[in-house]
Image (cartoon, grey):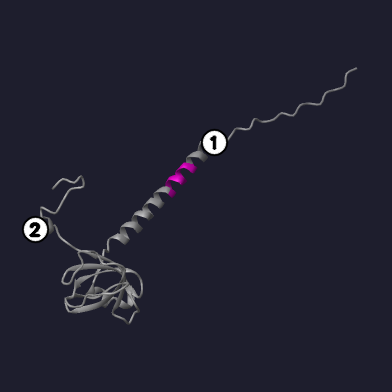
Amino acid sequence: MSEPTAPTPTTTPVVPADRTIRPRLRLAMVGVVIVAAVGFLLVKGLGSSLDYFKTVDQAVSQKHQLGTSTFRLEGTVVPGTVSQSVNGATFDVGHSTLVVHVVNEGSPPQLFKASMPVIVVGHFASTDSTTFLSNQIMVKHSSSYVASHPDRVRAGDGSKN
């Protein structure tokens, strides 16, 4: 005689969850992170590049806020104040009625001279000092040099402009 067989349990088929939701959600989250990162970089990059320099007047009036943080200072080199040193140069920069004494480390550019507009990169020695410690001098010049000396200016390939 055969042994009775146990009844087989009836199982309800499991319906798989919609698997397309997870990849879409993951893709959306990655997209949001990328857009946020690009937005952050644009805001930071453009925000810091909009303030190119501070004039002497602005820098002196904001001296306590600026402290010893690095920024660009714009002014005109006061005639009779340029002094070359072993480490660089010292000079005064003025704008309107205010003057700041600049101590620069490094070689000034060849076009650097008194009575010309310059931008110096550096910081105040302290919040109470009007001495500006600089490590870079940028000379502001116009295209009038080309008009005044057309025989000296050459293109990158060696030909005259």
Judging from the image, what secondary structure is the residue with disc 2 in? helix
Q: Which residue is mark 1?
A: 19
Q: Residues within 10 Å of mark 2 (few under 14, many from 20)?
A: few
Give x and y (percent) for residue 157: 20, 44
Whether residue 108 appears in magenta in the rendering, the answer is no
Q: Residue furthest top?
A: 1
Instruction: Report the magenta stretch's main SS.
Output: helix
Q: Residue furthest bottom?
A: 128
Highlighted range, magenta:
25-33
The quadrant of the picture occupied by the N terminus is top right
Q: Which residue is mark 2?
A: 148
Please say if 33 is above or below 141: above
Q: Amino acid at mark 2?
A: Ser
Q: Amino acid at mark 1?
A: Arg
Name the residue located 12 percent from the left edge and 58 percent from the top edge: 145
Give x and y (percent) for residue 104: 30, 72
Give x and y (percent) for residue 52: 26, 63
Q: Residue furthest left?
A: 148
Q: Which mark is residue 110?
A: none
